[in-house]
Amino acid sequence: MSRVVLSKAAFLSTANDRKREDVPMPEFGEGAVIPVWAMTARERTAFERQFANANGKTVDARVQEFRERLLVACCRDDDGNPMFTVDDVQALGGKDAAVIERLVNAAQRLSGFTQQDIEQTVGN
């Protein structure tokens, strides 16, 4: 494989390098999916900031909603519009854990979250 060093212009071009994955939702019928998008660097920073107060310590109530808030950040329609808002966090928390975990796993993988990142974000 040859090596090609990208220029700044090539890297910052308008080409869409944002990954997304259709996560199957067989519980809702054949072919049903929810698109999960990778976060941008800016979105990930904003996401992580939700979990810290002014002193840098985690906010307990939000820590308990990590999965649901991750889905708010990453589940989008085909045009990139968010499927959920923070107003949906409680409703998402009431869904089947296996279904939610399937979406969460995709969101974590696509957005580059390691277990260490998650533990650091939620202060666990």
Image (cartoon, rainbow, N blue to C red):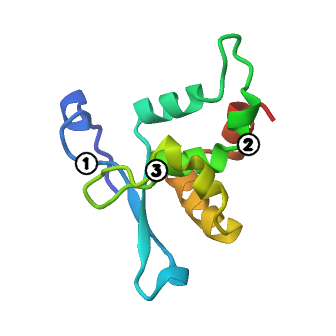
Label 2 neighbourhood size at 10 Å, few (<14), some (14-19), many (20+)?
few
Residue ranking furthest to the bottom: 30
Residue 74, disc: 3
Which image quarter is the N terminus in? bottom left
Cα distance in 3D space between marks 1 and 3:
16 Å
Residue 64, disc: 2
- For label 1, the SS is loop
Give the quadrant of residue 52: top right
Residue depicted at x 64% and y 50%: 67
- Give the label, 1 or 3, closer to the camera: 3
In the displayed structure, would residue 40 be above or below residue 23?
above
Cα distance in 3D space between marks 1 and 2:
33 Å
| Labels 3 and 2: the sequence-earlier one | 2
Give the quadrant of residue 11: top left
Mark 2 residue type: Gln
Work out whether residue 78 or residue 113 is closer to the camera in this orientation and state it.
78
Left or right, residue 101 beside residue 109 = right
Residue to which mark 1 is pinned: 16
Disc 3 + disc 2, Cβ < 8 Å = no
- For label 2, the SS is loop
Q: Residue 36 at x, y = what percent? A: 44, 58
Mark 3 residue type: Cys
Left or right, residue 39 beside residue 116 = left
Count of residue discs: 3
In the displayed structure, would residue 98 be above or below residue 112?
below
Q: Residue 79 at x, y = what percent? A: 25, 56
